[in-house]
Amino acid sequence: MKKIKFRIYDKINKKIINWDDITLIDFKSRKCYLSTKFKENYTYITDFEIMQYIDLKDKNNKEIYEGDILKVKSKNSDKIYYFGYVKWCALYAKFVLKLGNKIETSCMGYVDFWEVNDSSYDIFILGNIYENQKLLKNYKNHVG
């Protein structure tokens, strides 16, 4: 069964907040409540982006989330076949690997994960679109 979990990018403090530190996401009030370690009270943030876990892991066993920047290499060579970021495509109701170096709302120019999630490819997380946008801008350095 698919594991549903999220992480948050806190736009104010510019950091990723992991699933274990999220107590509640209130979509109506647009508040994300965080557990405060070693305290019994809670704090919340209001300026954040939600990233859903897509139920896949990369070559290093790291969980892949929406917004992660990925490169996909052949196991038999150093050639990089695909470079892009994980995006929810509402048109097709699925997560896709959006190719290229621009963050766009369009679903054009993508690869399905079923195409690269097999034994002939390795997927690597390079960063994410919130903390590492320079990776996207310099994507030509990653594509062979």
Image: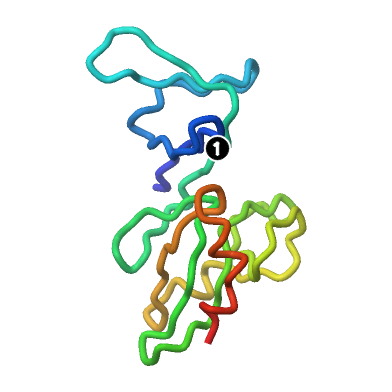
- Residue 106 falls in image quadrant: bottom right
Q: Is residue 99 left or right of residue 41?
A: right
Which residue is rendered at x = 29% and y = 60% of the image?
A: 61
Residue most extreme to the bottom: 77
What is the x, y in percent for residue 66?
53, 50
Is 129 located above or below residue 40 in the figure?
below
Label 1: which residue?
Answer: 50
What is the x, y in percent for residue 35?
35, 20
What is the x, y in percent for residue 89?
68, 54
Is 44 located above or below residue 91 in the figure?
above
Between 14 and 110, the one nearer to me in the picture: 14
Q: Tell me which amino acid carries mark 1.
A: Ile
Which residue is rendered at x = 64% and y = 70% of the image?
A: 99
**Tally of marks:** 1
- Residue 59 falls in image quadrant: bottom left
Between 55 and 58, the one nearer to me in the picture: 58
Which residue is rendered at x = 45% and y = 71% of the image?
A: 117
- Residue 11 falls in image quadrant: top right
Colour approach in the figure: rainbow
What is the x, y in percent for residue 1?
39, 47
